Image (tube, rainbow, N blue to C red):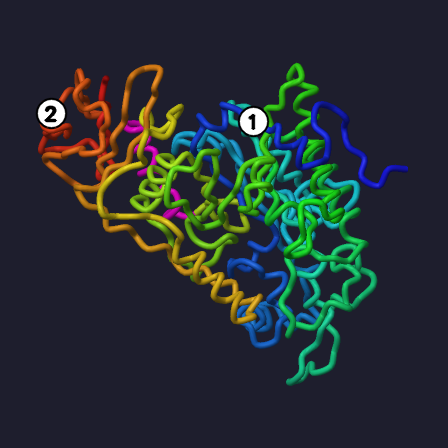
Amino acid sequence: METYPYLKGPFEPSFESLYGFECPEWFRDAKFGIWSHWGAQSVPMYGDWYARNMYIEGSEQYRYHLRHYGHPSVFGYKDLVQLWKTENFDPDALMDLYVKAGARYFFAQTAHHDNFFNYGSKLQPFNSVNYGPHRDIVGEWRAACLKRGLKFGISEHLGASFEWLNTNKGCDKTGPYAGVPYDGSDKRYVQLYLDNAEYLDLTKPRRHYTLDKRWPPRWYECVKEMVDLFRPDMLYSDGAVPFYAKGASVDDPTYEPGLKMVAHLYNGSALENGGINRCVYMQKDSRPEFYRIGILDKERSLEDEIKPLPWQTDTCLGNWFYDVRAEYKNHRQVIGLLVDIVSKNGNLLLNVPQRPDGTIDDECRYTLDRLASWIKVCGKGIYGTRPYLVFGEGPTRLGRSAERAAAEQAAKLLLPDANLHPKEPDAAWTAWDIRYTWKASEGKIYAFVMGAASCVTLTRLREAEKVKRVRLLGCGPVPFHVQAGALSAFLPERLPCEMANCLEIQI
């Protein structure tokens, strides 16, 4: 029997064959998606990696768990998942809000590193149908998404799970429970906690993808179940193509399950679409030979220039899972990120944190509201556009983010559990900062004026002498003149948007 069975079709599970991937136009046109990075780890409302860090004596989440729920030798993650009730979860109402805010695609999380599945899996009994909410969370999201014509994606984070869950095999070194094993050592719950005690040494850096031979086949059958059950338009792997050893070449056989999953996804789509793949696979290895098989995803990080191939930034308003301590991005930051990313041939995937009951808080709702007002006016310069000859001009640059730099610094210090996610800085946009997009077939260039201005001069507009008219979206025609190859446009005193007002320039 084949270890990694996959649908046969135009794509073979090899880099050479998968280089035949062409990004579907719907993804290039969509530009903006929303993500529900939500699950049982949301219950404490105390941030990301809770299922791992609650078993690390002395960590913030360990202390919170000890004082709020009890000691992890007695009340462990298996008990916490039962508290996830989702009693106010209304996927239809949330999806309406996300569509209004401008989302053209949506991602649901099938399983995080915690190995708890958000649907009625036949392979993992610890899932949201059998425990906690007793609901098929992913299925409900999918129905709400497709009803509104959005593209649907699933994110899987299982590649890291085998070693990530090792902390539940430890015990306290001090205090009243010193030497008492955490509940991860209880063999009755091995399907959730995994048989991984040999990886308990926390002084060693944790590998994102384990090299243990037992895990790749398990990862493959679970992710194949997800793909076959939900038939997503997009599949997101949290990391590089599974499975790999750091520094391995593309010929390394450890990539076999990852590449077969990509071929399975694409061939399934081709089967439904007359031999043409319309699905997108996303992973995070930035080496060209890797991101050519799908879309390069940059977690909390950006590109400095226009990239020849489409790419995506994923980030979140607060922390990945709901965190009462988190400082949120405001709507100005989100709009600035979206415009800058689109000008460089990218898409933005934004996680909106959900409380354990399924609702979002007033801060998130307000940001989505302001985003909806802006997209209603300026969306024409976002959707269906392509990068202009230059991405923009002006002194302000959004590139490699502070968040990513902090995470990398933590890794260098061998602090794999630091989970540092400082707030991204709010760019101080000026009136000289411009970001361009265009629709070549319509002869229209869009210039986003990132700061407040009464007069704006565009110095990098290659077709300035050919300009017929200039409109301010949400307002109407504005006076302009061209001199020495630069176009100056005069804006009204009252601008339609708080920031990133958009000029439509007809050539």
- Name the main secondary structure of what is drawn in magenta: helix
209 left or right of 295 in image: right
Which residue sits at x=52%, y=43%? 297
Under mark 2, the amino acid is Val
- Tell me where residue 222 appears, x and y as whole percent: 74, 43
Q: Indicate the quadrant containing the N terminus: top left, top right, bottom left or bottom right.
A: top right
Q: Indicate the quadrant containing the C terminus: top left, top right, bottom left or bottom right.
A: top left
In the rendered image, which quarter is residue 56 located in? bottom right
Label 1 vs label 2: CA separation?
Answer: 39 Å
Under mark 1, the amino acid is Glu
Nearest the eye: 245 or 80: 245
Q: Is residue 356 magenta?
A: no
- Classify mark 1: helix, strand or loop: loop
Please say if 475 is above or below 257: above
- Classify mark 2: helix, strand or loop: strand
39 left or right of 268 in image: left
Nearest the eye: 170 or 219: 219
Q: Which residue is mark 1?
A: 22
In the rendered image, which quarter is residue 390 located in? top left
Crowd class of label 2 (few under 14; some 14 to 19; many from 20; radius 10 Å): some
Which residue sits at x=74%, y=50%? 126
Which residue sits at x=51%, y=41%? 35
412 left or right of 216 in image: left
Can I make out residue 442 in this image? Answer: yes
- Tell me where residue 224 appears, x and y as whole percent: 73, 37
Q: Which residue is mark 2?
A: 482
Nearest the eye: 369 or 135: 369
Nearest the eye: 121 or 487: 487
- Tell me where residue 149 appears, x and y as whole percent: 51, 23
**Extreme-right residue of the structure:** 1
Please say if 344 is above or below 174: above
Magenta range is 361-378
